[in-house]
């Protein structure tokens, strides 16, 4: 997947963050995202690259004059589960973060600016003259922002979203219809009640489906566990 080059990806001297859930069996060289001017060098001359190599989450940045390189502690990503990875710049520091914990931080060199010189390619990395892909990798919920959450905020995101990546997690409305007829929130239990043409779905505030009852209703209300369907 490729996001074309545009001014939104010119972060300049401001904060930014690139974040995604990742799952892969590859513990060698594995690309997460890349942008490169493809001029000389292993990564190019101006580049923005995140990858796994030899079990380490690596973040490589250059504006053609200044460079920065971050290697996290060994952190193998394998097929036993999903992990949330984030890289970016926050308050004058480049950082890598895994599951809400800052693994590595380094000071941004004075005068350094950051951009994506060739747009942003997801699931690849530029290396020594060509783009490389990792087809066995899986990604979900890529986020690119011109701001950077704190480690505590990333941890909060992880703690909520990890429920969606557990085996067998139900995160969609029951049935096959996407035509929502009515919504209600129980103010006591905080459960969400959703009516579609196929029936009644109950979901937690975190977005997990707990029940689905087929039927034909157009209105729903709920209070303290009592549900009225009409």
Image (cartoon, rainbow, N blue to C red):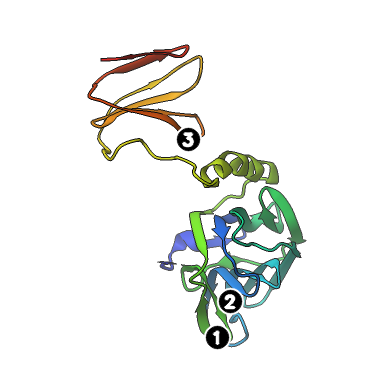
Label 3 Cα crowd, 10 Å radius (few <14 / some 14-19 / many 20+): some
Residue 63 or residue 19, whichever sits in front: 19
* Image-based side of 146 in relation to 222, left or right: right
Numbered disc total: 3
Q: Which residue shows up at 71% across the image and 56% down it?
A: 92
81 vs 32: above or below = above
From the top left corner, tell me how far across and down residue 60 is, in percent: 65, 70
Gap between marks 1 and 2, in whole Å? 8 Å
- The residue indicated by pointer 3 is 208
Badge 2: residue crowd in 10 Å (few <14, some 14–19, many ≥20): many
Residue drawn at (25%, 32%), measured in percent from left and top? 198
Mark 3 or 1, closer to the camera: 3
Q: Dot 1 lies on which element?
A: loop
Q: Which residue has dot 2 on it?
A: 46
Q: Are marks 3 and 1 in contact (CB under 8 Å)?
A: no
Q: Disc 2 on helix, strand or loop?
A: strand
Which of the marked residues, 1 or 2, is nearer the chain's N terminus?
A: 1
Query: Quick one: SS at disc 3?
Result: loop
Q: Is residue 15 visible?
A: no
Q: Which of disc 2 and disc 3 is earlier in sequence?
A: 2
Q: Residues within 10 Å of mark 1 (few under 14, many from 20)?
A: some
Query: Which one is closest to the eye, mark 3 or mark 2?
Result: 3
**Side of 145 where 152 appears, left or right:** right
Mark 1–mark 2 CB contact (< 8 Å): yes
Q: Which residue is mark 1?
A: 39
Quarter containing the N terminus: bottom left
> Is 32 in front, or is 153?
32
The front one of 158 and 154 is: 158
Residue at 49%, 54% (x, y): give it: 140
Pinpoint residue 206: horizontal percent, then vertical percent.
51, 34
Task: State which tag comes first along the sequence, 3 or 1.
Answer: 1
């Amino acid at each position: 997947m490729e996001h074309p080059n545009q001014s939104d990806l010119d972060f300049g001297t401001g904060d930014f963050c690139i974040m995604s859930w990742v799952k892969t069996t590859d513990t060698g060289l594995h690309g997460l995202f890349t942008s490169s001017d493809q001029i000389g060098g292993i990564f190019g001359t101006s580049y923005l690259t995140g990858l796994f190599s030899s079990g380490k989450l690596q973040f490589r940045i250059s504006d053609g004059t200044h460079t920065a390189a971050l290697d996290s502690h060994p952190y193998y990503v394998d097929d036993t589960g999903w992990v949330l990875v984030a890289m970016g710049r926050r308050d004058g520091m480049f950082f890598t973060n895994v599951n809400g914990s800052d693994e590595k931080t380094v000071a941004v060199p004075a005068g350094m600016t950051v951009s994506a010189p060739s747009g942003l390619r997801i699931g690849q990395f530029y290396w020594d003259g060509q783009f490389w892909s990792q087809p066995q990798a899986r990604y979900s919920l890529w986020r690119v922002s011109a701001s950077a959450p704190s480690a505590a905020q990333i941890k909060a995101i992880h703690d909520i979203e990890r429920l969606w990546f557990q085996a067998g997690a139900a995160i969609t409305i029951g049935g096959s219809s996407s035509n929502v007829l009515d919504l209600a929130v129980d103010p006591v239990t905080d459960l969400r009640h959703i009516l579609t043409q196929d029936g009644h779905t109950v979901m937690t505030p975190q977005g997990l489906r707990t029940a689905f009852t087929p039927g034909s209703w157009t209105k729903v209300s709920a209070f303290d566990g009592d549900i009225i369907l009409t």
